[in-house]
Every structure is written in C-alpha cells, then in structure tokens.
Amino acid sequence: MDEMRAAILSNRFNAIVEEASTTLYRTAKTTFVKVVQDYQCAMATLDGEMFAYPLQSGVTSIIGAPLQKTLSMFRQEEWQEGDCVITNDPFSTEGLLTHIMDITLIRPIFVEGRLIAFGWAFVHATDVGGAVPGSISPHFTEVFQEGLRVRPMKLYRAGVLNEDIRDIYLDNSRIPEEMWGDLKAMLGSLVGMERRMVQLCRRYGQDAVRAGMDDVLSFAEEKARSVIKGIPDGVYRFPDYLEGIEDGEFSLINCEMTVEGDEVTFDFRGTDPQIPAAYNLTSGSRTHSQLVQAMVSYVLTVEPTTPRNTGILRPIKTRTPKGTILNAEFPAAGGARVASNNRVFDTIIGCLDQAVPGGIGAAGAGMLGIIVVGQPDRRTGHNRVNVVNPICGGGGGRNGRDGVDATDVRYGTLKNIPAEFIEVETFLRIRSYRLVPDSQGAGKWRGGAAISIEFENTGPRATITVRGLNRFHFRPWGVDGGQAGCLTEVLANPGTDRERSIGKITVHVMETGDVLRITSSAGGGFGDPLARDAASVMADMRGGLLTAEEASNSYGIVTDEDGRLDEAATAALRMRRSREGKPSQGFVWGAERDAQDRLWPPSLRASLAEEALKEHPRRRHLLVSRVCEEVRRSGQPVKPEILTELLGRYRNDSYRH
C-alpha cells in the first residue's frame, strides 16, 4: 500500500461521493429523501467493494453494502457506457437492499472506454404499492403484501431508457411522479460520479486511481484491525428481545462475540426463526453492514480517521443461520426490518460493554417509528402518501457522556420534518412535539429523553402506518447501576373519554378530529445515579427535563423552597442511600425483562430457537410460538427437562394437523 497515494485519493474519492450525495438529496422529489434524507450513494470496485462512502449527508450506517451477488448476474464484458441496473429485491441480491422499499441503482463508470468502477445509489421509496399507503405495515406476513418486487435488470442500456421497466415501477406506486423524480435524482448523482472520476483519472492516470481504490480499502482494514486488537481476546454473549405484533410475542436475538487478535466474529446462532411479520432482515452469506453497524461505529469512534469503506468489514466476520429473523428467506416480509436491526445493534453494544474495560454505553431507545399518512391531497384531491416524521427516542448514556435527547445514535442521520411541511402537505395539524420529562434512564451519565409527537386530523379520513415501533414491554437497559429507560406508548384521542392505548400501529384510521400521540422509549443510564454531578441534575431540572421528585428519588438531590440545591442535605441523603445498598453491577434490565429471564433462562431460550431451525421452514415459528405459549400459561420457569418434554410434545402431535 502506498500510504501517500492512499491519503490523497481517499480525500479525492470522498469529495466525489459527498458531491453526488448532495446532488441527490437536493434534486429529489419526496419529503423522505429531500428532508429526512433516507438515501445514499457510493462507489465500488469491479469486485463490488465500496471504496468511497459519504459522511456528511444521507444514511451513513450501511458502509459496505454487499454488491457482489448483484454484479455477478452481469458479465463484465457486457457492460456498456450509459447502462444502469435497477432493483428492489432483497432475495436475489442477497441483501444488497434489505426491504423492497429501497429502490437501488447501479451504474458502470467508464474512463476512455475502460470499465474501472461502479456507482451505487438507493432511495427509500415512499410507496412501492402493496396493501397500505407507504407499503409497510408490521403485520404483513409475506413480501407480496408489501408491493412490487423486481430482480436486477437494466433500466438503461447504453444510455437508452427502457420505458417498460420504468413503468413497471411507476404503475405500481401510489405516487408515480414523485417516484420518478427520486429516480432521476439518483441518476444525476451517478452521472456526476462518473464525470468526476474521468477528471481524476486524467490527472493521476487510470492505473494510479485503480491502485488507489485498493489502497484506501487496505488502509481502512488496517485501522479496523488496530481497533479490534485493542479489545481483550475472549468470548462475550448478549441476548435481547424483539417484541412481536401481539402482546407476549418475543423473538430472541442472540449474539456471541469472539475476539481473537485483530479479528472479531459475531455468531447469531440461537436467534429465533423468521416470523410471519414484517420484522425480518435478509442479510445473505457475507458480513452484512446492517448486522455489524455497532462494531463499525465503534471502529470509527476509536479511529475517526478511518476511511469509510468496505475495508472496515474485512476483519469482521458473521455467522447468521439462514431462516432466522436476521437472515430470512423468501417470501419473508421485511418492511419493518428496522426493528430487528435495532435489537442487533443493542446486542453488539452489550457484548462490547463486557469486552471493553469500563464499558461503552447503555441501550438507546431501540426503536424507530416512521409515521406515514395516506390521505387525499389538499390541492388536487388525488390520493397522496406522505411521511410525517421519524421518531426514535433518546440515546443511551455513555461512558463519559449523557445520551442524546430525542435521538438514538443509530439514527442521528435521519432529519426531522418541520411542522410547517407536514401542515402544508397534509391535513394533519401538529399539536405538540416535545421532550418527555422524567423519561430518561437515570445514571452517572443519564440516558437521552424520550420524544412525543401529537397530531390531529383536520381533514378527510386518513390512514396511518408506523413501522419500527418497539420497546413497549422490555425497557432499554442500563449499565452498572444506571436505570432502564421508559417504555414506548401510543394513545388515540388522549385526554378524552375516547382515549385508548393502541400499542404497535399496524394500520390506524383517523377520522376528522381524531388525535394520535406517539411517545418513544428513552435511553438507559450508565453508572450509579448517585455519582452524577449535582450541577448536571439541577440543569436538567431548570430545563424542564426532570422534576424535583424524580431528582430526589433517582439522584438523591434535595432542593430548598426556592428550588436551589441544598448541598448539605443532598450529601447526607446520598451518603445514606449509598450505605443502604450498592448499585447493581452489569446490566439493569428492568422488572419486565427480569421476569422474562426468570421464566426463560436465555441459554434455554436460545436452545429452543436452534431446535426450531431443524424443522421444516413452515413449522419453525409455530413450534417456538406453541412452546412459549405453554410456558406462559404454566408460569413455571423452564428447565432443560421441561424444554425437552415440550419440544417432543409439539413436534410429535401438533404438526400432524
């Protein structure tokens, strides 16, 4: 590796993709791309390794998306200048995109007739057809319900548009004009990449630029290996639960992290089989960026000068059995796969907390609710689909920093949609959008506060879908005495005689005058709350994030009648509480998860998942569901002999029907 060349060309490559990324979102049509910024573009080698990925705009969390399977469908000698492949199929591409709403384009980059690289781009299409506006509902059981799915094919051949292929997409969308606008924005970004690469090759020469691609990948790999080498060798395990559609439905996400020298392996054996809901992720046979995002983020945190490219993934291995919720097979629904991504992220953070001396952080809110409304357009009267807002809740407290209020670190790139946009483009009126007091997990470094949005439908009937909501039952966990964060809540018509809790939203209809309030979960705390700086507690009180009662209960803070800190009384109260009991060590799950683990020891719950994977695919989830339902009814903690008996009963009897 030529280090000087790597440094120079890394900056050049980054400038190209940053410009292309800016072009895409500034020319896009839909709110979800041009405001929220759920899109991205990058450049890849002929072998499909992304060597340049943007950082300043768009989704920054899928560095190293797997292009290899898709590129293998086309012989290299068949590519022509001006070609462009389009797809939205997770299955045939082995997870290049992970749900069918992520329409993806791949365009070859030629310099003086020579193919030297590929440009890649995706947008989250606001609507690709399907049973509901926005195409996603968590209760869908098959991908067919989610809309149109098309395997890779050439949208352009030698610069000539195939209108038939384009119209397949547009004819199946509720908003074809907006979809075509987003596709043209992607095309503009890809053309811009090629233009800049031609200029770069003219300056440095094609051979030097091609060698530079390999250099920057190797440079990122070296950085990643140096970070991993700093983690003590060992095996670290962490289980967590994804909450299903119905109450009491929990899918185990099981992670075992093995660190050996400068390599790390994440083994997800013991994770539950794919489920008849839209939470499934298709990740293929390679290390998938969405599975190991937490590890990539750790590398970039420790070594922030690491180039953003696939080289980071080279020393990171995964074992993800096919047929699990993390490597689902056709025809699994996956529109709301963001929920399972969240839980994988949490399990890796949990492993790193055990491996890295002192730990790194508590769980963030662990959910991402993308609110979508289907309603007639107030100007034309035609049906329209709009994204209202992403809502994700506060981040976990970290070793040395508080969690970020209202924003989990995993979703810091998704932008807020101003209320004015929503009220102009829809009939919804935003009644409040605020942080929630006393919601954050207390700790020496507290969790980030929850966020609540409340809106009223002032127009005709509206259909609301929200994907990715979770943490209604199991709280975001704390670390080393830090408390768990609050739970998610959804209320229809709050404060009226028609108020009702509706839990996870699949499809919710709002009549004129109806109100909906969605309150996120909040991040867990890190460290003993009694060790928190009193001035920081007082600042939260002055800011309205913490009541005096909660400050006393969780932090041992005493104030006088004027709301000022009583230092002597605070010191005495904290001393007394410290003598009464030491803070919890390790993870603080919350009462709900503690009860689950007493009923189902995690190791036995993982054994159930592994046994279920031995069954026919149609039987797997049913076996898990029936065994878990029997355990819930009995209320008796599971022991090995009980699990063996239940497996035998439901394998031999129930599946005959």
Image (spheres, grey):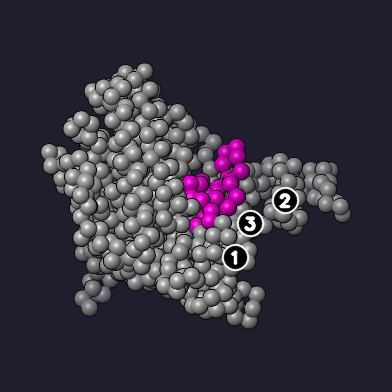
Q: Is residue 596 magenta?
A: no
Few, some or many C-alpha atoms within 10 Å of disc 2 (few <14, some 14-19, many ≥20)?
A: few
- Image quarter of the N terminus: top left
Q: What span is colored magenta in the figure? A: 390-417
Badge 3 amino acid: Leu
Indicate left or right for 542 with 513 as reference.
Answer: right
Task: Give the residue at mark 3.
Answer: 435
Task: Give the residue at mark 2.
Answer: 543
Whether residue 604 can be seen here: no
Badge 1 amino acid: Ile
Indicate left or right for 561 with 111 as reference.
Answer: right
Task: Give the residue at mark 1.
Answer: 430
Question: Residue 521 at x, y = what percent?
Answer: 55, 58
The residue lying toward the viewer, choosing from 241 and 47, is 47
Residue 264 occupies which quadrant of the picture?
top left
Q: What is the spatial separation of the Cα atoms under label 2 and label 1, in whole angstroms?
A: 22 Å
